Image (spheres, rainbow, N blue to C red):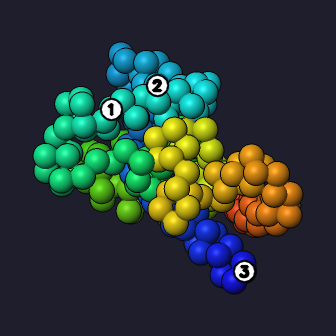
């Protein structure tokens, strides 16, 4: 039935966006920490790199990943030799692409959350010999958790709506790599207006829910 097909597509898209958010957050956390609390000579370069995906067309990011993970090149060849399969045209590749595209948003959100923390607290924790995991769990997370959750939500919302990078590196195979954005594209291409309207409604609804929760967290943080 159509409703079950739509539900499967939505759940598939949510899974991909959750994985993308997890990947992006694992890299965004140390980057945001370094940009906010550390001093080093190549900090401006790291800042440019962290925000670069925001200014690059997503299709270029998808193409670069397509080349990077191709079995014809070193990384793709290594992955293929270890796993016996290629990341190209898989849903995991789509999640990686979404993670890169949404990376600047989650880095900036984490930085905003960290900006409310007195740097003296971080320095004191370091002087007491605390490791980064200890500093994060005892100081950073309790003081910036609302901002961090807001960053996770905005990253999720961006990931679930990603199209340009994902369709290049993961394709548009129903039941395998097709997400709600590429399904809308397919429906537009085949002039299936009812599917376009229905899937667009689902997509907009998920975006509204994510952004609403994000705004609630941000407003609570600012009070």
Q: Dot 3: what SS? A: helix
Asked if residue 170 is positioned above or below residue 74 in the image, the reply reads below
Pair 3/1: label in front: 3
Q: Is residue 18 visible?
A: no
Pair 3/2: label in front: 3
Q: Looking at the picture, how far across and down is residue 134, in whole percent?
A: 30, 59
**How many angstroms separate mark 3 from mark 1 (CA)?**
37 Å
Mark 2 = which residue? Answer: 49
**How many angstroms separate mark 2 from mark 1 (CA)?**
18 Å
Q: Dividing the image into 4 quarters, which one contains the N terminus? A: bottom right
Mark 1 = which residue? Answer: 68
Report the residue at 13% width, 46% height from top.
81
**How many angstroms separate mark 3 from mark 2 (CA)?**
42 Å
| Left or right: residue 121 compared with residue 103 | left
Q: Looking at the picture, how far across and down is residue 65, in whole percent?
A: 40, 35
Report the residue at 59% width, 75% height from top.
8
Q: Earlier in the sequence, mark 3 or mark 2?
A: 3
| Left or right: residue 37 compared with residue 82 | right
Disc 3, disc 1: CB below 8 Å?
no
Mark 3 = which residue? Answer: 3
Q: Earlier in the sequence, mark 2 or mark 1?
A: 2
Q: Dot 2: what SS? A: helix
Disc 2, disc 1: CB below 8 Å?
no
Report the residue at 46% width, 41% height from top.
169
Snapshot quadrant of residue 216: bottom right
Crowd class of label 1 (few under 14; some 14 to 19; many from 20; radius 10 Å): some
Q: Is residue 170 visible?
A: yes
């Amino acid at each position: 039935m159509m409703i079950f097909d739509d539900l499967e597509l939505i759940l598939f898209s949510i899974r991909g966006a959750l994985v993308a958010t997890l990947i992006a957050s694992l890299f965004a956390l140390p980057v945001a920490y370094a940009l906010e609390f550390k001093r080093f000579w190549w900090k401006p370069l790291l800042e440019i790199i962290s925000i670069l995906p925001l200014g690059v067309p997503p299709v270029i990011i998808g193409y670069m990943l397509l080349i990077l993970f191709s079995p014809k090149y070193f990384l793709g060849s290594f992955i293929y030799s270890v796993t016996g399969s290629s990341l190209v045209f898989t849903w995991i590749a789509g999640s990686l692409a979404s993670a890169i595209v949404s990376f600047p948003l989650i880095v900036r959100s984490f930085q905003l959350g960290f900006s409310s923390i007195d740097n003296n607290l971080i320095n004191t924790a370091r002087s007491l010999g605390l490791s980064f995991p200890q500093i994060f769990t005892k100081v950073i997370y309790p003081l910036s958790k609302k901002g961090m959750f807001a960053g996770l939500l905005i990253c999720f919302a961006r990931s679930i709506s990603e199209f340009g990078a994902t369709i290049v590196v993961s394709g548009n195979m129903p039941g395998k790599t097709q997400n709600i954005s590429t399904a809308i594209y397919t429906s537009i291409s085949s002039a299936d207006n009812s599917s376009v309207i229905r899937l667009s409604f689902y997509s907009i609804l998920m975006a509204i829910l994510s952004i609403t929760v994000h705004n609630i967290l941000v407003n609570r943080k600012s009070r």
